[in-house]
Image (spheres, grey):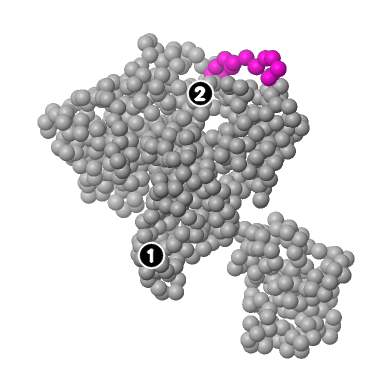
Amino acid sequence: VPQPVAPSPGHSLTDAIVHRCRTRMASVHPPAGAAGAAVMFEFWNDRAFQVYDAAGQQALLDAFTQTPRPSTLSLQGRYTIQFFDAVEHGRALQVNNRTKFERPLRLKPPYTLPGYPQAQLPPGPFHFEFEDDDGQGNPVWQPYSQQLQDELQLLVLCAPPPAAAFFAEHRHAYWLFGLDELVSGLSKTQLVQQNVRSGTHRQVVLRPGGAAALAGPGGALPPPPLPPPPRGPQAKAIPHHARPGPRRPPPQAAARPHRGGFAGRPGPFAGSHLHQFSLGSAKVVAFDGASQRPLERQFKAELLRHWMAQPRPQQASLSGGWVVENFAQLEMGAAIMTDGTDRFPLVVSFPPLVPGCVQLPADLDADDALDMSTMGHHLDHQQVSALAAQGPDAGKCGICLCEMEADVGNGAASGSHPGFADVGNVAASGSHPGFRIPAAGRAAGASSSGYSAMELDDDSPGGGGAGNVFELKCGHAFHKECLEQWFLQRKRCPACNKDFGKVFGTQPDNGRLQWSLEGYALPGHPDSQETILIEFAFPPGVDGDGNRYQGRQPQGYLPHNAQGIILLELFKIAFRRRVMFGLGRSMTYDSYRPTFNVHIKTSTRRGVTGHGYPDPDYFQRALEELRGNCITIADLLT
């Protein structure tokens, strides 16, 4: 077995491993044609892996036996093969030159390449199982189909076993990571299955025996035996005793070095970058002495409701008299769950991060349709009269500055106020664009009929039904038509700036955000042994006013723990809504270029003043900057 490789300065552990594999392959490649009879190439055809035709096979074999082996090559003029220098590790892709559609490419299993060790497998028959859910939050282990069992057993017989294996089961596509770690033995192996479309992760294990003999009705396996419930005075620590699942390492510990592409290139699973991340995927455990016990679903659901509150409460009350103290510091590990007698620290973790990228403009977020019913309610005549009784300005619309009435009655058959006139310069009247105030009403503030002298242009959005008064959930009331037109620009209350929808910025709409894992820890985060590397790229371009801006490629660092994963997911949303960056003149470089709206840590060290770590307040400051750009934790509860 090759000796462990330590990363050199400025390079990740994955880079070191890849370099070792490339060096070994370059030194042990047989002469051209020597491996031709033993090695064949396959591509995924949307249903199964298919062997290339004779011409394609020969072209790939010729490239495979070159020293050094090329990373990229052209195939038959129609395809580009990417990451071909790592095909034995399961990372190669076939890209259609016309459609840019990507398909996995692999060596047909089983294969044995000289110089590579084989997996250390259990004696006798064995099978694969994946972690499932019985629909009530209880873990259940299921075997794969027999056809897939046969496929996976061929893969583990390969030398080397692939680091990433693509497969399909029940019309869903998956990646399986970690087979390469079997060379170190089962005890050191952590297999993870990732759904290509949703990004969902599940643990996978090898068990002795054949899957067909162990499977019960419907092919489902009974869950492994669960540990007995705690006894003694600590037995009441977590209400109703949520039954813990099978013993397994926390998700953070299960993370592995970046299995994607090399030197900043996205891996074969980059297409899964927009999976629906949710805070609901968090694992919240309470430490009970020397053991950890997951919260039951009822308490986790209550925590999620408090989690999305703005501002987040410092103390969260749960059912049964339980309270979470220091709740605002939940991600930092400072929250304590207590019933007044017992106290249990809470720790939050998420499934291991999967490297990927967001590419603009393809992945730009879309604005939601305007749904006023979710933002507040209409006021009747008595409620509007009550507003007017609160003071001379309380009964006026803060947008058009005119008096508000609940209904227009029969004042205008068309649904608009009487006195419509085109007065030219609307801005001078102090009203919102799209509304016109008659000259007579401008001084008096009301028409002779007693209604507000405000009118909606026939060709402006939201026309008709003027006179309706709408109160937002924040408590501020306006003409409904005024609000509808105001919200066309920004879904934010004109009085208190409370947000009622997505906000989009001026960041260039052509760019890329890419993330991967590095094999070292950041100062100040002892709970994480890895670092999330985030890389932005903006090519030069022209803004909406025709001004040219320079390109930029900043990169930053986040800890691979709950804080870093949450910030990364919020950064993705900010990037897709074009508020992560703005456009401005850099004082440092004296150039017009993308500038940070939400600041990132551009150094792994150097502390707060050097834009690096340690910085115990960075998580909270970043949340505040995101909130200032209308992105909050609640955006992750989808």
Give 562 or 82, whichever is nearer the viewer: 562
Which amino acid type corresponds to the residue marked 2 in the rendered image? Arg
Which mark is in front, 1 or 2? 1
Q: Are marks 1 and 2 in contact (CB under 8 Å)?
A: no
26 shown above or below 498? above
Give the left or right position of residue 330, taking residue 506 as reference.
Answer: right
Residue 201 in the image: state x and y as whole percent: 49, 34
- In the structure shown, which secondary structural element does the residue marked by tag 1 occupy? loop
Task: Locate residue 222, reporting x and y percent.
Answer: 56, 17
- Left or right, 50 with respect to 136, comes to left
Give the magenta range.
220-235
Viewer can see residue 569: no
In space, the residues marked 1 and 2 are separated at their CA atoms by: 49 Å
Residue highlighted by disc 2: 248
Question: What residue lies at 48% left-to-right and 55% top-to-bottom?
Answer: 599
| Disc assigned to residue 457 | none
Query: Which residue is nearer to you in this view: 233 or 79?
Result: 233
Give the residue type that dot 1 points to: Thr
Q: Within the image, what quadrant is residue 189 found in?
A: top left
Q: Height in image: 479 above or below 472?
A: below
Q: Is residue 133 magenta?
A: no
Q: Looking at the image, which residue is at 65% across and 40% down? A: 326
The total number of labels drawn is: 2
Q: Is disc 2 placed on a helix, strand or loop?
A: loop
Q: For the point 68% across and 37% down, which residue is it?
A: 325
534 to 195, vertically: above or below: below
Quarter placement of the C terminus: top right
In the rendered image, which residue does mark 1 sit on? 588
